[in-house]
Image (cartoon, rainbow, N blue to C red):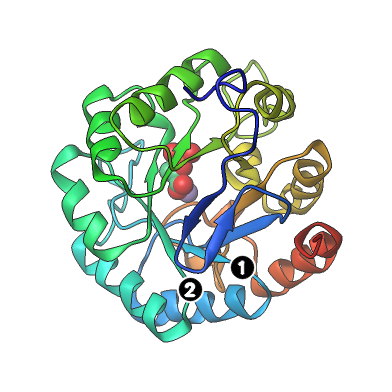
Amino acid sequence: MVSREVQAHDTVVRFGNTAVGGNKFAVIAGPCSVESEAQLMAVAEVVKKHGAVALRGGAYKPRTSPYDFQGMGVEGLKLLQKAKKELNIPTVSEVMEVSQVESLCEYVDCLQIGARNMQNYALLKAVGESKKPVLLKRGLSATIEELLLAAEYIYDAGNPNIILCERGIRTFETATRNTLDLNAVAYLKQRTHLPVVVDPSHGTGVRELVIPLSRAAAAVGADGIIVESHLNPCEALSDGHQALTGPMFEQLMQELKPFVEAA
Ligand code: PEP
Ligand code: MN
């Protein structure tokens, strides 16, 4: 059902006042984790001011180590809702378990399925039944075909509002956190009518590489990016080394202007 052979025209996924897919390049931005009201509101204001169309922020965090910050949980979701209301910006946040779907639906506008859960079929069915827009990330070692079949689970459960996300894959390379597979973006744009966004933050793991790879994502035909930003990355509770500072986010938006403003 997600194939271009079934539907030739591009799917546009709408949530709040935002559309992903179609002609405009959408920039979704915010911190890796929601850490406090002050942290979230400050970065949300900056990304909104410079043109982000949606705010990201994790309240439930899939951390490699059980001893690392696991997220604020429902308190984080409430802060996202507050930022949404005060700044009039829709929100995206990760859902890690079936039991969390209902509260995520109550507080945020778009449900993120993280890379580690791309093949959690119970979760895919649950977000499919929810009908909320879903941002589905490619698994760490998933093929493009497996990503498309994961999307098919959501679609088959009754939810066509799916955004695919290339967020880098595991390769032999160790200079960067992951290897951003831009082949996948060009390939997916031909194979599926679903919108495709790129996550250059997890794709590289290196703050200085995020702007050039964002330009590359726009050039290869992605429908947008999802990027991590933090006003004080040294103190971030997760993924600080890949977070854009406020001035870097402003520079990113300057460089993406021709794509963001395209009619
Ligand atoms: C995230 O977006 O912070 C995240 C954990 O992403 P991924 O699932 O792609 O690793
Ligand atoms: Mn992160």
Give how far across and how far down residue 40 sits, in percent.
43, 74
Q: Name the residue tied to disc 1.
A: 52
Type of the residue with mark 2? Ile
Mark sitting on residue 89? 2
Is residue 137 rendered to the left or right of residue 23?
left
The local crowd at label 2, few if under 14, some if 14 to 19, many if 20 or more residues have their Cα within 10 Å, is many
Q: Secondary structure at mark 2?
A: loop
Type of the residue with mark 1? Ala
Residue 78 image-quadrant placement: bottom left
Residue 227, visible in the rendered structure: no
Residue drawn at x 40%, y 59% is 33
**Quadrant holding ligand 1?**
top left
Is residue 28 rendered to the left or right of residue 122?
right
Front-lying residue, 122 or 6: 6
In the depicted structure, whether residue 262 falls above or below residue 167: below
Is residue 84 rendered to the left or right of residue 99?
right
Residue drawn at x 21%, y 47% is 101
Give how far across and how far down residue 93 sits, in percent.
37, 54
Measured in 3D between alpha carbons, the distance from the residue under mark 1 to the one under mark 2, in whole angstroms, is 8 Å
In the depicted structure, whether residue 176 falls above or below residue 257: above
Give how far across and how far down residue 216 sits, in percent.
81, 42
Please say if the residues under marks 1 and 2 sit with CB atoms less than 8 Å apart: yes
Give how far across and how far down residue 149 sits, in percent.
44, 17
In the depicted structure, whether residue 85 falls above or below residue 147: below
